[in-house]
Image (cartoon, rainbow, N blue to C red):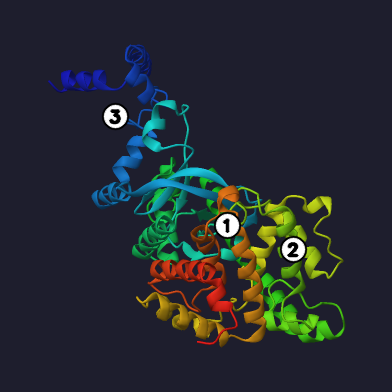
Amino acid sequence: MERSTASDMASEKPNPSHHSTGAVQMRIKSANSHHDRLSQSKSMILSENVKVAEPVNRHRRNHSQHNLTLADIISTQDHTVVEKEGYLLKAKIADGGKKLRKNWSTSWIVLTARKMEFYKESKQPALANLKPGYKPECVDLCGARIEWTPEKSSRKNVFQITTVSGNEFLLQSDIDFLILDWFHAIKNAIDRLPKEQSCTSRNLEFKLRRSSSIELLNSLDTESKEPKAEHRKSLIFRLNYSASDTNDRNRVKSRLKKFISRRPSLKTLQEKGLIKDQIFGSHLHLVCEHENSTVPQFVRLCIEAVERRGLDVDGIYRVSGNLATIQKLRFVVNQEEKLNLDDSQWEDIHVVTGALKMFFRELPEPLFPYCFFEQFVEAIKIQDNAIRIKSIKRLVKKLPRPNYETMKILFEHLKKIAAKESVNLMSTQSLGIVFGPTLLRPEKETGNMAVHMLYQNQIVELMLSEYSKIFGSEED
């Protein structure tokens, strides 16, 4: 009985050749199934101390799905809900901190809770025409900043979005209420998201969970098992790169602080003649004092040039000129070079009008001083037209002389533009929309921005329509 049992036990020992044959048969069998062939990534010839396990699906997508929690799935679904979509002008001016040349283009913008997507066309109609593999440009709003930046472009209603990764986008629309609606929608989306630090850690966690390497996740737990050599090297490289990047930033900050503390003041540089008093960006009264006049010479030259060759031009002051040429003209004026606006390089009259608008837009204090803003707004609210005109005239008379004289010559010029409305299609209302926010603005923007913009336009329009009464010499 014992001998029989021993022989039975001997017959039950694994036979290497038999085991190998079985493995080959299993490989042949698995070849009949396309799904199983994709699932088997290792040889089926196993060592004696390894058990034959059921085929395991090692597809990357399955791993990433199993690693995501229910909360993550719900959160991901919430972030895909479209909050707003529509057309705006877009320009990307920085990519990862590297400045780019500004290039405006019309984009269909889709806003969700966490990101924005830019399409060349409206998303729904264009789905059938998108090429395989097409991906829209995405902007992660977590930790992003949004602000109005009129100095970044000669266009009106421009705001900028800056992301944590260093990308910068300009968005613009000529329709006031539309751009305001977009600004508040994006700002509300950013405010609802976590701050930059928690946002960064969440992104890192999500990327790790979506990683194609399970060993990379396990490498973070040193008690579980030792990571593979190649993944360990990759992790060490990332940590070293992050540490060296931080050290480089600290060194740059330290050097910048030393440079700033040692650099001479602006007044010292001006006294030595290294920096000249500039026309653009200076206070109006300083420019007039420097030129010993009450109206800046540049303003007079621009007005004369437009009246010589631009009164009949369609969309004068509304159409934007080439921004690069406008900046070139700005540089020439600031360098106090002899300016001849009849030169061929300034032949596009829209460049001249664009430079004039930029001059008023870059004044540290607008042509209508900040302290007068609320008074002009209250005056335009008066229902009786005669009293309204008298109130506006009384305020205009109180302005500092450079502001009054410059305003008088500018509005006289704009009145000549409006007189040619049948040719240039620029009415007093159109000119009010163009010049209202440029000449008249509050010192601090508040939630009443849309209402203020309406009053700004109405004030300029009224002063053009009633120019003779407001700037006339007769007393009230």
Picture quadrant of residue 220: bottom left
| Tag 3 secondary structure | loop
| Tag 2 secondary structure | helix
Whether 79 is drawn above or below 276: the answer is above
Q: Is residue 453 left or right of residue 93?
A: left
- Disc 2 target residue: 304
Q: Earlier in the sequence, mark 3 or mark 2?
A: 3
Q: Position of residue 96 (x, y in %)?
A: 59, 54
Residue 122 versus residue 277: which sits nearer the camera?
A: 277
Residue 337's disc number: none
- Disc 1 target residue: 155
Q: Position of residue 173 (x, y in %)?
A: 48, 53
Question: Alpha-carbon distance for marks 1 and 3?
Answer: 67 Å
Asked whether residue 218 is in view, the answer is: no
Image point (51%, 49%), residue name: 89
Q: Earlier in the sequence, mark 1 or mark 3?
A: 3
Q: Amino acid at mark 3?
A: Ala
Question: Alpha-carbon distance for marks 3 and 2?
Answer: 90 Å
Residue 36 versus residue 459: which sits nearer the camera?
A: 459
Q: Earlier in the sequence, mark 2 or mark 1?
A: 1
- Disc 3 target residue: 53
Image point (40%, 46%), residue name: 86
Tell which tag, 2 or 1, sits nearer the viewer. 2
Q: Is residue 442 left or right of residue 288?
A: left
